């Protein structure tokens, strides 16, 4: 491609590159992204291969980048074979599909081919096949857990022994680390999208039984949402979906409730009802709505009760709002502020209180958060007392640390 230069990254452009990577990956594989943190860590990671980490410049402007690190194939006898792994690879969104990504990948594979026996990646076979990647399973290679994974692909350059692929620590970032790093960038809303692979980053289950129970419910909520087809239905009418409440904050405990905010250009009641019709007609499901258009809340409320594959009933509360209106983003930011304010101790307290709630009391999640985070409530008895002077209706605009 004319005017395209590929060269090693320059320290003066690190931050700009991280912004580019964030733009390219945002909402792509999960709501928000983690790849800008991975790139940030690459610069100091011992496993990183700087000679293969290239920036693409188009007419003097940063257009994309690619990173490589040393990784390993672990053999059954305990020995290890070094391979390289590639990624992230990113092209500025407005410059994608012009061949820049392809040039970055081809050029670096050429260099890598002289130094290693294989490059192993997780990626879409439809894209990477053109660069000589083949399913890793053809070579007897599994993921680190010993599972066959269709996204795991390998570009061979020599003899490759079978084994389990260990991509290495530089790629292992926790949601907390990502949140802290992302807060150094301009605020951006995260969306749920039916094409995303994860709704939250995969993490090992916590050992603490209470936290594990909450985590398991969260995983089931994700699964339910993925299988339900709801995201596709909203996307079909051009809506953007965000999660809010306990599902967003990772504070689910007993209730199989998922709260979504759905943003459309206008509040077209008939269009939304048409999109949701298949759900109201599905066996065991019930869809109710409240028309708040034209009121101060200016929203349509859709409440869907629907059983999952095992017959357990889930409630999805969907608040449809006009994009860009007064409440756009407000509750998403509340959930983020709660996550920021949580400590391991307060998270546990909130979950304990939620677990203690008798069935049918319908206490709003935000009540537990305010009681624990702001007002130091620790027991169920204290919480009941606290509730007498904090009626639920007064908490709409609450944020941690704000009266
Ligand atoms: C993936 C990416 C680096 C490719 O760079 P690019 O400059 O857009 O790609 P190219 O112009 O060389 O190639 C474009 C082709 O790749 C396809 N393509 C791009 N990304 C793809 C993906 N994730 N899966 C399948 N196909 C993909 C395009 O549809 C197009 O196909 P076509 O040639 O058949 O029309 C770029 O699109 C990007 O930054 N995406 C967001 C981040 C990402 O997904 N990175 C890869 C995962 S690590």
Image: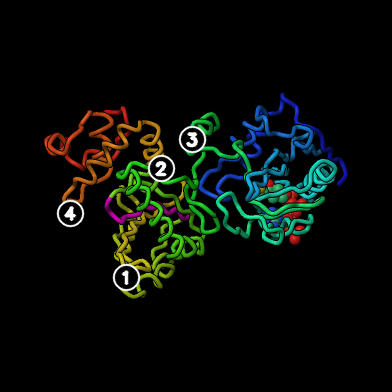
Gap in Å between the C-alphas at discs 2 and 3?
14 Å
Q: Compare residues 239 and 201 and report the one nearer the observer.
A: 201
The residue tagged 1 is 285
Circle 2 SS class: helix
Circle 4 SS class: loop
Gap in Å between the C-alphas at discs 3 and 1?
36 Å
Does 4 sit left or right of 72 as displayed?
right
At label 3, counting other C-alpha atoms closer than 10 Å, the crowd grade (few under 14, some 14-19, many 20 or more) is some
Gap in Å between the C-alphas at discs 1 and 4?
21 Å
Whether residue 90 is visible to the viewer of this picture, yes or no, is no
At label 4, counting other C-alpha atoms closer than 10 Å, the crowd grade (few under 14, some 14-19, many 20 or more) is few
Q: Position of residue 342 (x, y in %)?
A: 35, 33
Residues at circles 4 and 2 in contact by the CB criterion of under 8 Å: no
Precedes in sequence: disc 2 or disc 3: 3
At label 2, counting other C-alpha atoms closer than 10 Å, the crowd grade (few under 14, some 14-19, many 20 or more) is many
The residue sitting at the top extreme is 12
Residues at circles 1 and 4 in contact by the CB criterion of under 8 Å: no
The residue tagged 4 is 359
Q: Quadrant of residue 388?
A: top left
Precedes in sequence: disc 4 or disc 2: 2
Precedes in sequence: disc 3 or disc 1: 3
Precedes in sequence: disc 4 or disc 3: 3
Instruction: Say if the magenta span includes residue 96.
Output: no
Circle 3 SS class: helix
The residue tagged 3 is 179
Q: Position of residue 141 (x, y in %)?
A: 66, 55
Residues at circles 1 and 2 in contact by the CB criterion of under 8 Å: no
Name the residue: 30% across, 33% down: 346
Gap in Å between the C-alphas at discs 4 and 3?
34 Å
Q: Position of residue 306 (x, y in %)?
A: 33, 66
Residues at circles 4 and 3 in contact by the CB criterion of under 8 Å: no
The chief SS type of the magenta part is: strand
């Amino acid at each position: 491609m004319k005017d395209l230069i590929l060269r090693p990254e320059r320290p003066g452009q690190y931050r700009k590159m991280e912004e580019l990577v964030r733009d390219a990956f945002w909402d792509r594989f999960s709501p928000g992204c983690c790849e800008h943190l991975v790139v940030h860590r690459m610069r100091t990671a011992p496993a990183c291969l700087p000679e293969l980490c290239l920036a693409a410049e188009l007419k003097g402007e940063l257009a994309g980048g690619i990173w490589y690190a040393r990784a390993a194939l672990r053999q059954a006898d305990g020995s290890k074979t070094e391979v390289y792994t590639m990624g992230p690879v990113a092209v500025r969104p407005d410059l994608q599909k012009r061949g820049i990504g392809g040039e970055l990948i081809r050029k670096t594979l050429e260099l890598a081919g002289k130094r290693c026996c294989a490059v192993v990646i997780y990626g879409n076979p439809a894209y990477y096949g053109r660069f000589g990647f083949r399913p890793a399973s053809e070579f007897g290679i599994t993921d680190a857990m010993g599972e066959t994974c269709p996204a795991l692909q390998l570009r061979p350059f020599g003899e490759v022994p079978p084994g389990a692929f260990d991509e290495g620590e530089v790629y292992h970032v926790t949601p907390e680390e990502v949140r802290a790093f992302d807060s150094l960038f301009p605020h951006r809303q995260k969306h749920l999208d039916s094409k995303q692979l994860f709704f939250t980053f995969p993490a090992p289950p916590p050992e603490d039984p209470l936290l594990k129970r909450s985590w398991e419910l969260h995983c089931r909520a994700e699964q339910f949402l993925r299988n339900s087809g709801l995201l596709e239905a909203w996307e079909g009418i051009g809506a953007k979906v965000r999660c809010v409440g306990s599902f967003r904050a990772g504070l689910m405990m007993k209730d199989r409730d998922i709260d979504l905010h759905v943003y459309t250009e206008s509040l077209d009641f008939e269009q939304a009802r048409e999109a949701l019709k298949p759900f109201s007609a599905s066996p065991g499901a019930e869809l109710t709505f409240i028309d708040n258009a034209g009121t101060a809340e200016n929203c349509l409320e859709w409440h869907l009760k629907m059983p999952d594959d095992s017959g357990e009933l889930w409630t999805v509360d969907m608040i449809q709002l006009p994009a860009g209106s007064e409440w756009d983003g407000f509750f998403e930011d509340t959930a983020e502020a709660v996550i920021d304010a949580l400590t391991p101790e307060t998270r546990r307290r909130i979950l304990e209180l939620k677990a203690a709630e008798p069935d049918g009391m319908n206490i709003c999640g935000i009540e537990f958060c305010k009681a624990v985070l702001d007002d130091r409530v620790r027991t169920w008895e204290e919480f009941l007392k606290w509730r007498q002077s904090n009626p639920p209706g007064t908490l709409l605009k609450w944020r941690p640390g704000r009266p």
